[in-house]
Image (tube, rainbow, N blue to C red):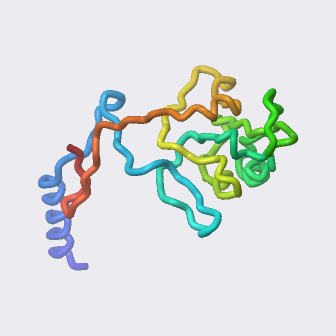
Amino acid sequence: MSGASGIFKAIESGTKHLVIRRFTLRYPEQKLKFVGDGYQFDPKEGVGIAGYKGRHILYHDKCTGCQLCAIACEGIAEAIGMVKIDKTWKHNKKSIMPQIDYGKCVFCGLCVDACPFYALFMTDDYELAAYTKEHLIYTPDQLAVKVDYEGNVEIKIDDQGATHG
């Protein structure tokens, strides 16, 4: 690249950024609106369904206590531990369900991929801040609660870049 063409490329690059509108959200007043549910895995098709990888949701009526989610997490983050629950389920004779430590979780989604019974999914909820490490450990009862996340800002992507309305 000669000196003159390098100068023109630099001017072109600089002027492009003068035209493009900046993309800044005022969090927490403005939150992104996600499309669809969180990340899911379809074992029959063998494909992941795209979505944001946030907090998990556990369906107690589908979990068999097979521990495949904990085994999948074992070599990655070791964030999932199986704990004994008070309820007895016909399909979960051991009465154990996953408990997730979000202080260790890397949100890779392998636990969702490993679940053959559609019991574990990931939601769009990413607001998981806590004051202590103990509050980042979610019990099976806490994982069963589906958080209703409502983003109010939608992203629009075009040739000029990403903007929000």
For image coordinates 65% across by 41% down, the residue present is: 59
Quarter occupied by the C terminus: top left
Q: How many marks?
A: 0
Please tell me whether residue 135 is drawn above or below residue 31 in the rendered image.
above
- What x and y, as percent, mark residue 26? 29, 32
Q: Give residue 5's quadrant in the image.
A: bottom left
* Residue 151 seen in this snapshot: yes
Quarter occupied by the N terminus: bottom left
Please tell me whether residue 130 is drawn above or below residue 164 in the rendered image.
above
- What x and y, as percent, mark residue 20? 17, 53
Of 48 and 130, nearer the camera is 48
For image coordinates 22% across by 60% down, the residue present is: 158
- In the drawing, does residue 111 fall left or right of residue 157? right
* Residue 137 seen in this snapshot: no
- In the drawing, does residue 69 fall left or right of residue 136? right
- In the drawing, does residue 128 fall left or right of residue 60? left
For image coordinates 77% across by 53% down, the residue present is: 68
- What x and y, as percent, mark residue 57? 60, 40
